Image (spheres, rainbow, N blue to C red):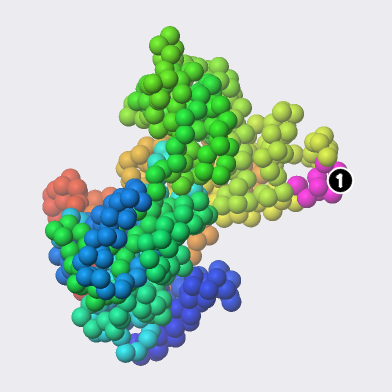
Amino acid sequence: MTQPEAKKRIETLTEQINYHNDLYYQHSKPEISDYAFDQLLNELLTLEKEFPELGLPDSPTQRVGGTITKEFATVVHQYPMLSLGNTYSYEELTDFDGRVAKGLEGEAYEYFCELKFDGISISLIYENGLLTKAVTRGDGVRGDDVTANIKTIRTLPLRIKQKNIPPKFEVRGEVFLPKEVFKQLNKEREDIGEETYANARNTASGTVKMQDSGEVARRKLDCYIYYLLGEDIEAETHADAIKQLELWGFKVSPTYKKCKDIQEVFDYINHWEKKRDDLPLETDGVVIKINSLEQQERLGFTAKSPRWAIAYKYKAESISTKLKGITYQVGRTGAVTPVAELEPVFLAGTTVKRASLHNANEIARLDLRIGDYVFVEKGGEIIPKVTGVDLSKRNESLKAVDYITSCPECNTKLIRKEGEANHYCPNEEGCPPQIKGRIEHFIQRKAMDIDSLGEQTIKQLFDLGLVKTPADLYDLKKVDLLKLEKVKDKSAQNMLAGIEQSKTQPFENVLFAIGIRYVGKTVAEKLARHFKNIDALSSGTYEQLLEAPEVGEKIAQSVVEYFKDPNHQKEISRLRAAGLQFESTMQVPNVVSHVLEGKSFVVSGVFQNYEREQLKEVIASHGGKVLSSVSGKLDYLLAGENMGPAKREKAEQLGVKIISEEEFKKMIEG
Ligand code: IVH
């Protein structure tokens, strides 16, 4: 393809993708399948890789991330990002209303109420309609430039389509992880044996500061916009500004309301106190703003916050109830989670009977004793938590909790690995919840996708002694399945068909399904692409594993340990004999040119414009070869930032040429 042809195709693809993105994310009415959409996006990604000079700053490919930022640049805010005065009481709100009335010297005024979204605030700069910078609040005066990460948020316009927009303006809003996404993320982490995150807000905050924007894209952040600033804004009220923002395609929460006086503000607060639990994100209060912008200006700011706005914070609903006991759950990875068994109590719309206590440290921190009255809170989160002990009701004869020392399911002595908060049951092969958990993990949609089997079926198959490992599934006969409750000929047939069908799942799914600790779906995909087949992977050394994208020490260690275990090796041979896919069919990169033909490269460190894996693909697409270690045969060591000193030394000793990213770009461009 010539450059002008590519330019035209890039434009067409961009237009199509933007159109479908809009249908999907703004209107929830997709016209094409996810697969068809991914095909368009992949074509665009390939073209941009081939013709980097044609990449646009608002390309929809920015949504999938891929840039690595080592250190975020500091940016000084044009308008400082102040915080709001807080209150928990109607009296103080009435005082606020009094101060406003006084400040406006008897003039009429109205309020504009919004919910207070519990995420992290962000400032976005648009120039000539393009999103050019996204900066965190930081200390209010200066923040971090997190543009690449923020561009992955699909509901944020990268370019404003409307004409007649101010040449430069700023919008502010709140970046958050929707409750559902957070729940899913934690479920996935639990599934691969990672500790779960405590709350959505901190996780969103950590995500915005991640170095790899590809990982940020996978986290599915979202953002509500609530503030428009700039020199040439044609709005007289905050309501006008909000309307403007909606018109320009920003996502504004539809929960706002104009209120004619403080009484209506109270009504708004009351209305949302309960209903906010139904919203897709966590909220912790209401923000009350003066609607007229001219009046806002007249009221002005104190050193810390505006006089024209205030935040009313909902008290986290908390109630005290008796701790009847502590039970312990064992997960697929053997991790033990203590659970508080409570005297049932009604809290924020539901009856609470149990709450997670996370681990032994948490029990010690709270100094819990069975029989204590404990405070239970629901901070908008679905799972309630124990926040403390009501010491005024403590009976001094109660004894501190003795944490269990052996597994509640199989009685094996528990272990606690260094640096980890959880206790583990090491009886991988014989502990029932671990066995059943592994099979449930294996059949899930993202893995082998055997939806004709479910948790109940697995339980019965296990109880009947028919299935102990995933490989046993492939030995099942119809007569076995007919032994299950309520299973007749047809459903048995169905189950067998589902099991048979799973043999076509690609290698990356199989790799995720076998359940290596810390190997989630994304890492499984990277490993499959990098090692290509199970033999290369299982014989990979710790150092070779570290060469794979997204693989750090913890994962490398875990993979090596997994394949060392003869039971795992046996299981893999059985799965292989059953006909599962242990070879990657992922596409080999397109050939772009032959300029690197016969040249070999080792890629190391962090790069400005590419993810390491991407860089390897670029090398291959220009005919070059990627090696994993520096030797005398090597032609080039492509050195990014933070490359280990050992590699450099070795290359220097052996006379291997060390090149920078810039030099590499020159090689392929001309
Ligand atoms: S307006 C000048 N509106 O609350 C203040 N802030 O303590 C402009 N927040 O840093 C802020 N929801 O992160 C505003 N609807 C909303 C908000 C909101 C959440 C956060 C924001 C700000 C903090 C103020």
Residue 432 is a magenta residue: no
- The magenta stretch is 487-496
Quadrant where the N terminus is found in the figure: bottom left
The one nearer the camera, 294 or 360, is 294
Q: State whether residue 66 is above or below residue 423.
A: below
Residue 493 is a magenta residue: yes
Image coordinates for residue 660, horizontal then vertical, percent: 18, 63
Q: State whether residue 654 is above or below residue 457.
A: below
Quadrant where the C terminus is found in the figure: bottom left
Q: Tell how many labels.
A: 1
> Viewed as shown, does residue 202 lie left or right of 71?
right
Residue designated by label 1: 489
> Viewed as shown, does residue 544 lie left or right of 454?
left
Q: Is residue 633 visible?
A: no
Most extreme residue toward the right, as rendered? 489
The one nearer the camera, 11 or 182, is 182
Residue at the spot x=23%, y=83% of the render?
232
Query: What crowding class fits label 1: few (fewer than 14 Cα within 10 Å), some (14-19), or many (20 or more)?
Result: few
For the stretch drawn in magenta, the main secondary structure is helix
Element at label 1: helix
> Viewed as shown, does residue 477 lie left or right of 236?
right
Most extreme residue toward the front, as rendered? 106
Q: State whether residue 20 is above or below residue 148.
A: below
Residue at the spot x=25%, y=71% of the render?
106
Most extreme residue toward the top, as rendered? 397
- Amino acid marked by disc 1: Asp
Residue at the spot x=14%, y=58% of the render?
303
Image coordinates for residue 301, horizontal then vertical, percent: 17, 64
Image coordinates for residue 291, horizontal then vertical, percent: 32, 72
